[in-house]
Amino acid sequence: MASPMDKIEHVVVAMMENRSFDNLLGWLYAAEGNKAPHVLPAGSSPLFDGLAGNKFFNKFNSQTIYASQPTSAWPPDNDPFLVPDPDPGEDFNDMTTQIFGTPNPIPFFNRANMSGFLKDYASIAGDKQAGQIMQTYSPDQVQVISQLARNFAVSDQWFASVPCQTWPNRGFVHTGSSDGHINNDDYEPYDIETIFNVMEKQGISWGVYSNTYVTPSLTHVQFLPRLIGYEDHFHYFTTFEDACQSTDPSSQLPSYSFVEPRFQPEPTLKIGEVAYPEDYHPPHNVCRGEQFLARLYAAVRNSPYRDKILLIITFDEHGGCYDHVPPPGGSVAPLPGPVSRYGGFHFDRFGVRVPTIVISSYIQPGTVFRSPTGVPLDHTSILATLRDWQQMDKNFASPFLPSPRIQHAPTLDYLLTLSEQDKNTNWPDIPATCNPDSTDESLSMPINDLHMSLMIGEASLRAGVSHIGKEAVAELRQKIKTYQDVIDYFQRAKDSANKHAL
């Protein structure tokens, strides 16, 4: 049977960092009373599940603070595009508190009510600063992601795969599992089969593209035991842009591309210049994330073969940012690792909603989509879509990924509702309208957990091992605490390499 995905030859997935749906897109259709222009599946709610109205709040101590927009400066001399600052909590216990109001919810008697964001953030930022966790960005502040959502398809019911940190959720988008991890766990790389391994065995082309100068690919670092030897599949983002513009099929995008923004500060090729993060991770400047998405979209928009490209933009997890929709339960356990390594979590509930946008010429503009089945959309829907598109489960000589989470996940082919004759030829120009101040993120800013994972990965690659070990990790943690420490580390590594080259 023909599938709408038959019109697609290249799938591109970009995964950004640590923002909830409400934080970036909660007010997307507020001016229209949250009336969605077009919903899928047909018959689902005509209302966009956003933040219109003054009715969503958290209480803590004597404070009752409502979800509001736009963000304002915290403190007053800071930049509203850095909210929230400092970085909210994102480990498993933090997220449990945010979702249930307590880190130890009693099943059935203490259901998710999204009441603990203010409480959890106060433990990090203090009572006076805690209110910023309830602030969200207006469509005018984040015009790139908002316009992409309005002009193509956005889901108001896409959930992170698990209520926990970056590495576990990225595990689900690449494998359908986190191998039992519910935190980043000192960044010991995952030794489990990835979608890239399956594609390689089945002769399907793939590539990972990172907008970095010296930082290694996060995907490569996280799955190093399984991706050693595939270094020729990892490229700079400029290679992605060049491939999008190629008219020669031999130099165009592979079948599957995974795109990574710059996650941490790093030196550029120009002496003394610093490239700052652009992944939306709090408190990184949201404007830089906007600029990266504009650049990614422009590369696809201007491609001579854009009608053959399906672009998916999502976020790994909510990063502690407020959202009003309780994550659903009832998720099936993944494989491998159906029970957490701490033994107390059975992967039976999803994480908080995250922004997810799907872009194609065959998508009706203004689409708001939800799951067409009884199973919620999450990151494994990407794997299920790739599986069916390339019929990877039909290759019995090289089995597809085993996780039941993928087997149950709804696919995304139902979004491609337009025919070849009626396809959308009006891909609007969407430039970034905000420009971050080059001084807004001081080099004295503390690094976050993700930065440390990349530094450990870089040190492991440099040492020629999959992981440098706990003692070396502890030493690295002592040495690298700020943006400046990261820059100095790369400079020392460069000087050492130059010395050995003499």
Image (spheres, helix red, strand yellow):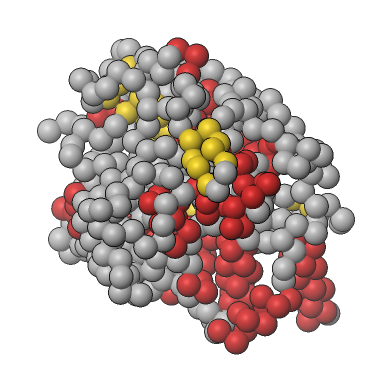
Q: Residue at x 25, y 58 (%)?
A: 107
Residue closest to the eye, 494 or 58:
58
Rendered position, 441 above or below 94: above
Q: Quadrant of residue 359?
A: top left
Q: Is residue 288 visible?
A: no
Rendered position, 313 above or below 51: below
Q: Is residue 106 visible?
A: yes
Rendered position, 95 above or below 338: above
Q: Position of residue 331 (x, y in %)?
A: 23, 53
Q: Quadrant of residue 295?
A: top right
Residue closest to the eye, 403 or 68:
68
Q: Position of residue 337 (x, y in %)?
A: 28, 70
Q: Residue at x 45, y 27 (%)?
A: 55
Furthest toward the left, the residue is 1
* Left or right of 419, for residue 22: right
Q: Residue at x 52, y 74 (%)?
A: 186
* Left or right of 216, for residue 185: left
Furthest toward the front, the residue is 62
Furthest toward the bottom, the residue is 471
Q: Quadrant of the C terminus?
A: bottom right
Rendered position, 306 above or below 89: above
Q: Residue at x 59, y 58 (%)?
A: 123
Q: Position of residue 373 (x, y in %)?
A: 18, 37
Residue closest to the eye, 10 or 83:
83
Q: Position of residue 84 (x, y in %)?
A: 63, 45
The number of callouts visible is 0
Q: Quadrant of the N terminus?
A: top left
